[in-house]
Image (spheres, helix red, strand yellow):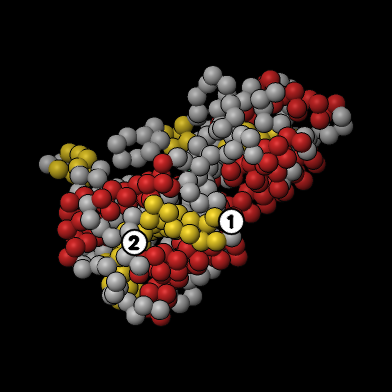
Amino acid sequence: MSMKRIAVLTGGGDAPGLNAVIRAVTKTAINVFGCDVFGILDGYDGFIANGGVIPLNLAAVRGILPRGGTILGTANRGNPFARKVIQDGQEVVIDLSDDTVRAIQDLHLDAVIVIGGDGTLRVAMELCEKGVPIIGVPKTIDNDVGGTEITFGFDTALMIATEALDRLHTTAEAHHRVMVLELMGRDAGFIALHSGVSGGADVILIPEIPFKHESIIRKVRERAQGGSKFSLLAVSEGAKPLGGQEVYARSGDAVYVPRLGGIGQEVSNYIEQQGFEARVTVLGHLQRGGSPTAFDRWLATRFGAAAVRTASKGSFGRMVALRGSQIVDIPLSEALAIPKRVDLKGDALATARGIGISFGDE
Ligand code: F6P
């Protein structure tokens, strides 16, 4: 297939490395395939917004490799199948997918590279079913997209979370306190698990393992009795007590997903009720902002280049993925079939338990 016009967009929450993908897509499409490249602004919205499509050339992507965020902008309420609009002064949710498909057809694009997490990639798959030639690139700090061993953005979030634990460690020790660090990750505990192990947490709470409050305090007491009068807890925002619910900062609706937040404070309150001094830190969007690590730049660049090569073969509805040390491409349907979660039988958990970390379940 001769590929002449290619577009790239970023959707959902940002992740460090988005600009590295945009740069790799643009450079590969121009240098290897001689394409015209277009950037779609603010996710899928850009297709139907006035001025939402911009040309991308080599000059436009110069200097963006180490930059966080995305030069194209993003939106996590930009699902064209469920778009919130104001009609007759009322807020309503409507399906704009046909308008989006028409706008894409009018641009005569040979390929659309969509960089996003599971929500954005699901929309990509549905648009592909309506005839749009789409290739997905998996992005998220949560590392929860199926079919790929790692998403770019995860390594940077991990580095920031680990540094936060290191910093909390010294102040916890100085004041004989229990420090609780609430981390992102939604329904997947990868950030808490990996940074907890790397940052020396004593207790790690993840969504995949419902915890018992008594089990947390037992660990804190054991440590205190053994002479370590401080403890460090890495708590995933989606962690929940056995038989209980996740803690939400805001409920969801047809457009917005519910926003997790507050479990760290809840656990900290419990620890204080048991007679220990505790403090909570919510690391929040610091995990998503700023410059990507070398690994994320490397992975993002390989993903971007591979997405363009896959598009050039004319095989659409696929997502690039990391398997072993190779970049492969797999059907989007396969990637989205099962969301990735921490493997309860995997070596990571066995390792963490073996070195004495509590998951609050024993
Ligand atoms: O999916 C990435 C993520 O950062 C989650 O870890 C977190 O729950 C969510 O996005 C936060 O979303 P927002 O930026 O909309 O608050």
- Is there any visible trace of residue 286 in the rendered image? no
- The three-letter amino acid code for the residue at tag 1 is Gly
Q: Earlier in the sequence, mark 2 or mark 1?
A: 2
Asked if the residue at tag 1 contacts the one at tag 2, i.e. Cβ–Cβ closer than 8 Å, the answer is no
Q: Amino acid at mark 2?
A: Ser
Residue in front for this viewpoint, 268 or 243: 243
Count residues near mark 2 (Cα–Cα under 10 Å), then give few for <14, some for 14-19, many for 20+: some
Q: Is mark 2 within 8 Å of ligand 1?
A: no
- Above or below: residue 188 compared with residue 47: above
- Identified at 63% across, 48% down, the residue is 161
Q: Quadrant of residue 179?
A: top right
Residue shown at 50%/29% (left/top)?
247
Q: Where in the figure is residue 59, as x and y percent of width and height?
A: 40, 80
**Residue identifier under label 1:** 324
330 in relation to 307, above or below: above
Q: Secondary structure at mark 1?
A: loop
Displayed quadrant of residue 222:
top right
Q: Which residue is mark 2?
A: 315
In the picture, the quarter occupied by the N terminus is: bottom left
- Left or right: 164 in relation to 126: right
At numbered mark 2, what does the secondary structure look like: helix, strand or loop? loop
- Residue 97 image point, x, y percent: 21, 50
Residue 228 position within the rendered picture, expressed as x and y whole percent measured from the top left:
83, 34
Quadrant of res 268: top right
Number of disc labels: 2
How far is disc 2 from disc 1 in space, using C-alphas? 22 Å
Which residue is found at the position 28% from the left and 53% from the top? 128
Along the horizontal axis of the image, is 179 left or right of 303?
right
Q: Is residue 51 above or below residue 165?
A: below
Q: Residue at x 70, y 23 (%)?
A: 362
Q: Position of residue 124 (x, y in %)?
A: 32, 52
